[in-house]
């Protein structure tokens, strides 16, 4: 996050937003726009189009100025080249519906076919390149790939907050070949909001960090101890912390390589006088299934052969009390496997706590992370939050 703010403040100082560009700097220009349309899918059906909807204002603005707009993005994590299930076809179709015009899906993200489609396009047209992560060179930011990706375009707009913290070909690499390179409306909005919340937000400040793995959030957790007074830990990562405390966790998800790291996080919190809240009770199951047998047990009483899949009702009550005096709260990650009803109460419980703090006490609540956003939308409480971020892990980083 500190790196984000450093870059963002430099961009502001240099007037690096699309609104800072004169009309003649956009009219007729072939603009590559990095959006984040990494949406959840059920087969080919989009189950939450928040990220696509959030990209529309930037695209509409560029169209209105006579630009030729080409969107690029990743979707999922393809392992070895193109996979139909990770095609951006559904995203192009949905974007077209929202824009009220056809969005042409290119068959690739580099090459002669892409160059021809972009070259033949007219002012106001919108094109979407196929998934950039069909090439491993994308995440490696390989210079030859970057040059091919940038080749058909005159300038670059980054509107993908969710991936802006990664130095990939389509986020950072192309800026070396395309000038100007500026931010879109969504990136600017996200960073300005988070800048204000973290830098000048009212105290006490709390972070609610969930999800399955400590490994993906350990750096963030460490940094949050410097910025927040309170941290709630939930989700599968809980069990690495419980094991670090010497407790039995049955068959729950544990990252053994990060047990020592969890101990270090707890030791740092104690040294700084910061509070970390772990669940005191756990909903456990004898299988990872909606049909599994379940029971609620104390966090220190998980039996062998059972796995924790959500926090229990006592934990939710403790979270409510723990967070009751907080003025700024950031949530990233669910408390349990909320997609299965039996293990959804912890996540929806924390969503209700945050929504009520905003509605009743005026606290600033920021929801970041695809699963957190999906759960908040599903709960019906999205409208009660201060800000719903499109950024996933980026909102914390």
Image (spheres, grey):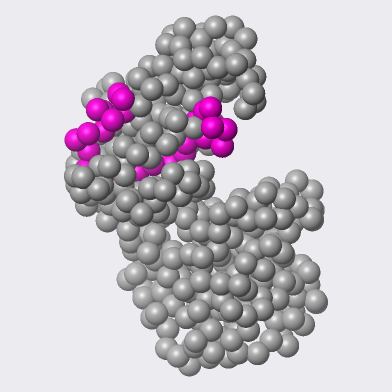
Residue 144: where, in percent of width, then height? 72, 64
**Segment colored magenta:** 317-343
Residue 338: where, in percent of width, then height? 52, 35
- Taking 222 as reference, is 64 left or right? right
- Taking 18 as reference, is 69 left or right? right
Position above or below: 353 against 52: above
Residue 181 in view: no
Residue 305 in view: yes
Task: Give the mark count.
Answer: 0
Position above or below: 105 against 342: below
Q: Residue at x 49, y 19 (%)?
A: 283
| Residue 5, image quadrant | bottom left
Q: Nearer the viewer, residue 311 or 184?
A: 311
Residue 244: where, in percent of width, then height? 46, 15
Q: Nearer the viewer, residue 144 or 111?
A: 111
| Residue 253, image quadrant | top right
Q: Is residue 82 found inside the magenta-colored segment of the image?
A: no
| Residue 17, image quadrant | bottom left
- Taking 259 as reference, is 226 left or right? left
Q: Nearer the viewer, residue 249 or 159?
A: 249
Q: Residue at x 62, y 27 (%)?
A: 290
Q: Residue at x 45, y 30 (%)?
A: 345
- Taking 275 as reference, is 2 left or right? right
Q: Residue at x 37, y 59 (%)?
A: 191
């Amino acid at each position: 996050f500190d790196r984000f703010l450093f870059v963002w403040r430099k961009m502001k100082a240099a007037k690096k937003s699309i609104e800072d560009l004169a009309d003649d700097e956009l009219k007729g220009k072939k603009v590559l726009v990095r959006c984040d349309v990494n949406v959840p899918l059920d087969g080919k059906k989009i189950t939450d189009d928040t990220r696509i909807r959030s990209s529309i204002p930037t695209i509409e603005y560029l169209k209105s100025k006579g630009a030729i707009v080409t969107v690029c993005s990743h979707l999922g994590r393809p392992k070895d080249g193109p996979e139909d299930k990770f095609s951006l076809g559904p995203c192009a179709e949905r974007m077209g519906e929202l824009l009220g015009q056809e969005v042409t899906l290119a068959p690739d993200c580099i090459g002669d076919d892409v160059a021809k489609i972009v070259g033949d396009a007219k002012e106001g047209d919108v094109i979407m390149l196929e998934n950039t992560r069909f090439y491993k060179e994308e995440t490696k930011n390989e210079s030859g790939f970057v040059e091919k990706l940038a080749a058909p375009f005159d300038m670059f707009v980054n509107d993908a907050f969710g991936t802006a913290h990664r130095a990939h070909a389509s986020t950072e690499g192309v800026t070396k070949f395309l000038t100007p390179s500026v931010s879109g409306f969504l990136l600017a909005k996200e960073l300005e909001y988070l800048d204000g919340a973290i830098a000048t937000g009212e105290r006490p400040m709390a972070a609610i960090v969930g999800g399955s793995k400590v490994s993906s959030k350990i750096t963030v957790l460490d940094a949050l101890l410097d910025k927040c007074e309170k941290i709630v830990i939930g989700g599968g990562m809980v069990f690495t912390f419980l094991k670090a405390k010497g407790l039995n966790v049955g068959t729950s998800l544990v990252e053994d390589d990060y047990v020592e790291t969890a101990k270090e996080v707890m030791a740092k919190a104690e040294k700084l006088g910061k509070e970390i809240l772990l669940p005191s009770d756990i909903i456990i199951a004898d299988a990872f299934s909606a049909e599994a047998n379940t029971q609620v047990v104390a966090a220190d009483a998980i039996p062998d052969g059972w796995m924790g899949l959500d926090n229990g009702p006592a934990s939710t009550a403790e979270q409510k009390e723990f967070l009751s005096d907080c003025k700024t709260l950031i949530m990233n990650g669910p408390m349990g496997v909320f997609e299965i009803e039996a293990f959804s109460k912890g996540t929806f419980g924390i969503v209700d706590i945050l929504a009520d703090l905003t509605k009743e006490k005026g606290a600033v609540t920021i929801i970041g992370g695809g699963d957190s956003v999906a759960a908040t939308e599903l709960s019906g409480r999205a409208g009660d939050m201060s800000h719903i971020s499109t950024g996933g892990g980026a909102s914390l980083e």
